[in-house]
Image: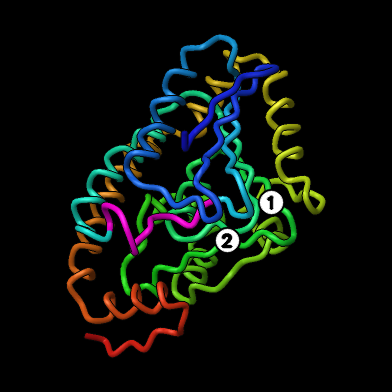
Amino acid sequence: MDLSVTVDGGVALLEMRRPPANHFDEALIGRIVDAATALDDDPACRVILLASEGRHFCAGADFGGGDFAADHVAAAERLYRRAAQLFDLRTPIVAAVQGTAVGGGLGLACAADFRVAEAATRFVANFGKLGFHQGFGLSVTLPGLIGTQKATDMLLTARRVGGEEAFRIGLADRLAEPGRVRDTARALALEIAASAPLAVRSMRATLRGDLAARVRRALDHELAEQRVHWTTSDSAEGIAASLARRAPVFTGE
């Protein structure tokens, strides 16, 4: 079981269980989407709390094994098709982000309505260090949360953004005490669950507008760019360097 689902007090906990890094693939994202879609029609669920087991929230796709190691493009196409469905959900989502949210893991965190972090949390858009274009709809979601300039900073430098900075710039909505990320995220979820559910869904839908459509267009563009970059020497070097835990040496080829 790499995903558990429990409902209590109007809050449904969806917990990823692939520690320590909680890498995802199309199968896991699909299970998250299917579980959340079912919860959309469950009157016992007013808010979804997305969390993960272990030290880290999510390190995105595993380029060293599984579907992505075999065929980046085909795996990404399947993954993005399922990921796009996250933006069709009607139930608010709170993400409890401990440890790191890296690459596609950052994209998953940004698909939630709210992110709860602690000072030790790290948000990393590491695509530039991997040698390819960002994905998971981050072209829309990240600038929507922190503005184009700060999103450009994160993407072009691939630097780590700590929890305190994330809270300051709006990437994190609550800053928890050390070791209290899950508890703080649940407290936020319970606050939302205490509001009138029909009104909550209506207000959320109004504020999101055409977000789902914009994300789908972005995903198509992101994949097209990635398809090109995955044929380059820089991308091969970036992925190899990441797997070997060394600094990449890019040549622009």
Name the disc covering residue 117, or none: 1
- Extreme residue in the front direction: 1
The residue segment tinted magenta is 58-68
Q: Give the distance between the C-alpha atoms of the residues marked 2 and 1, in whole angstroms.
A: 9 Å
> The C terminus lies in which quarter of the figure?
bottom left
Residue 59 place in picture, x, y as percent: 48, 57
Decide which of 75, 64 is in the foreground and name it: 64
Q: Quadrant of residue 210?
A: top left
Mark 2 and 1 residues: CB-CB less than 8 Å, in contact? Answer: yes
- Tell me the SS state at disc 1: strand
Q: Is residue 209 magenta?
A: no
Residue type at mark 1 is Ala
Mark seen at residue 150:
none
Residue that extends furthest to the right in the rendered view of this protein: 177
Q: Residues within 10 Å of mark 2 (few under 14, many from 20)?
A: many
Q: Is residue 153 above or below residue 121?
A: below
Disc 1 crowd rating (10 Å Cα; few below 14, some 14-19, many 20+) is: many
- In the rendered image, residue 241, in percent from the top left (x then y), is placed at 39, 79
Q: Which residue is mark 2?
A: 123
